[in-house]
Image (spheres, rainbow, N blue to C red):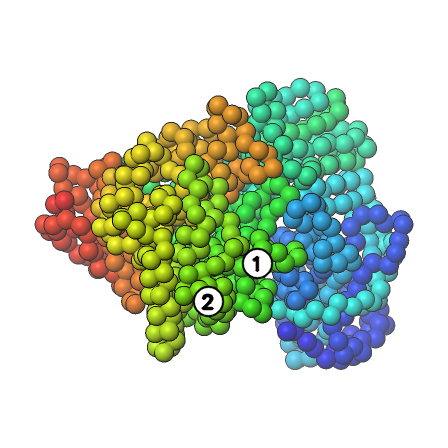
Amino acid sequence: MYNKKYKKVVFGESAKTHGSRYRNDNMWIKRESLTENDGLPVFVKFFIAEKGLKSCSLKITATGIFDVNINGYEIPDRFMPGWSNYFRHIDLCSYDITERIIPGGENTLRVTVANGWYSGKLGYGNKTNVFGDEKRLFAELTLTYDDGHTDTIVSDESWKIAVSDVIAADFFDGETIDARRRGRAEKIVGNAVITDFGVPFHAYSREPVRVTERILPQVIFSDENTVRYDFGCNFAGVIKVTAKGKGGEKIVAIYGETTDENGKVYTANLRRAKCTDEFILSGGEDTFEPKFTYHGFRYAELKKTAGTEIVRAEGLAISQDIEYYGSFECSDEVVNGVYRMALRGQKSNFISIPTDCPQRDERLGWTGDAEVFCNSAMFNADCDLFFKNYLSLVREDALPDGKIPSIVPFYMGISDNTAGVPGWGDCITVMPYFHFLHYRDASAAEENLPAAEKWIGYYLAKSENYLTKITNNFGDWLSVNGDTDPNVINQCFFGYSALLTAKLCEILKKDEKRDTYTEIYGNCRRAFRENYYKDGRISCDTQTAYAFAYVAGYLSKEETAARLPEIIRENGGGLTTGFIGSRFILPALCDIGETDLAYEIISRTEYPSWGYMLKNGATTVWERWNGYTKEHGFEDPEMNSFNHYSLGSCVEWLYSYVLGIKLSPETEKVVISPSFGKKLAFARGGTRVKGGKIFVSWKREKGEVMLEVKADEGVNYEIAPSGEITSVMKSGNDTVAMLNL
């Protein structure tokens, strides 16, 4: 928690302009009630900085989201301070703004505050003011001088309120900007008043959200009233528009992920989210860039009056500004397309927290979605701080009986589907485990082990003789013609999480606890086999059941091989898996010796498949396999997102099996063991591991396979591929091996 005893601030001869500062608590301010200023509140502080300035730091947060302008410079971070459960804490952001301060002159700090997650529309039903209804600001500016003395400026009643050109802003509905108000931007229309907000501060501890890509669109339709754009890919962001026209005329931006049968922007799946930005012209040339909203879209349509000229338009992709160091490419363009879909889906949904989708009236932190994709995400990018922050929110919202909410930050009432759901609650064991594999940092394991233990305790309390009786379930969410018994899935997660908890204990050298959870796992396995496995068949006999039971260690390779390939071929080679099974199916097939079948599935273009999405224009992974079919058109718009990363969990297989980058909790040594399928002529790509970056490539050459590994000097690895190694050449930490398969 951030807390400070405020002292009187002395500014030399200019002290009178700042007022007195005797405060013993955190000072919050809000806009006084004003009818003249009907836009967003802009909090303004004028101050003098002495000469000899050494540094200037700004600590700031808001109930809502803020935009900071210091002497005309806008800090590029968006949607700060990010999303937390504001009933429990709010993040405090810190900035070094020394270079933006004018020593010996007057400075102006302007902070605009919008609804954001705090008071804007949120989740199902467009709920508003879920956490509160007041836009408040907390700020503390500390100026340190060469002689060692400091000045401190805090948010108090000396701050003024100015006019904003942003009339309204909401994540779901969009933003309204009136360029006519920009001429009044310096006009002070009121005063700030003291308020309070008794929620603790936590230091902001992850990368910010920023514009990470600029995308130039193609005009696909234009007449005097409409310009329609195709940005070439689905992404999360806004359109930036420069236009000329008569003052007071309005441009309306409409967003959608795809087009309908008439070529118009398809908006039915947005549900109750308006996803519309409005730009009001000043009469000159105006540029509009929404900063307090975002949309999920590939297509955008600008509605305008005749005579209004659209000078320029570009897409601004918005995402967590994390480093993406993963790469993958192979000889099959379908597989390459699947990788790109999942990657862009990750970027679209990493905005403060891992969300399920960026477009409709939802955009929630579903724990199950994040759980199935986290390993893929960490192969792709540096998600260290991002997932540690999310796990802290999960722990904060965990219930006393160990139940983990299905949505974090948690904002709904408790019900069977909002907390204690297997697969969703298991994020508390899965995420810390894979975090350690990728970053070799035991702190996430240490921080989350108590919550993981309580989660296993919840399983135990809801079980009889280690057979779980939990009735809360989503099953294998959005499976296709392969409904797996939720009881089977729940039992698999019970043991899987017990096993991962044992591994967390092993990482932390808690041997006694490790043995306890290993024993629990063994009993879960026994209960599964006694109740759900007989005569070589799992009772529900689905692809997900066999794949998950194998990964959980409930079935041997031989037992899995006796049925899983057969059941896939009985379905014509197509998948029936949903969110849960799609993560496990390809690794299980490779492990049991069905590598070629796994390659057939990943490169398949018939429905249902990842390739079918690609064939139908997808650039991000769909929420459901049948999001669109030629036979039935668009699926139910109430549940049909075209930008969901969950089914993109196959990406971990591309890294771990196609490239063969195997990570283990027992050792920092990376084992390179690709699964060479007959379908591919080559594959190459890499990621970052303990010690640096590693890049793997292999290709077929005259009946042999050449395997090449390039790694930074600090990376410890060994090659252990299938097949006979006929020659090996080493140079530094790089290796080239020839294989006879």
The residue drawn where x is 36% and y is 78% is 512
Q: Secondary structure at mark 2?
A: helix
The residue drawn where x is 13% and y is 37% is 702
Check residue 126 in the rendering and tell me which mark sits there, or answer none: none
- 436 or 411: nearer the eye? 411
Task: Find disc 2 in the rendering and name its residue.
Answer: 460
Mark 1 residue type: Ala
Task: Find disc 1 in the rendering and name its residue.
Answer: 419
- 533 or 656: nearer the eye? 533
The residue drawn where x is 82% and y is 53% is 162
The residue drawn where x is 38% and y is 45% is 540
User: Local crowd at mark 1 within 10 Å, few (<14), some, or many (≥20)?
Assistant: many
Mark 2 residue type: Leu
Q: Secondary structure at mark 1?
A: loop
Is 3 placed above or below 300 here? below
Image spot of residue 323 (x, y percent): 46, 54
Image spot of residue 687 (x, y percent): 36, 53
The image quarter in which residue 676 lies: top left
**Quadrant that contains the C terminus:** top left
The image quarter in which residue 254 lies: top right
Image spot of residue 411 (x, y percent): 65, 57
Work out how far the residue at label 1 is from the one at label 2, CA to CA, in angstroms.
16 Å
**Quadrant that contains the N terminus:** bottom right
The reply to whether residue 431 is in sight is no
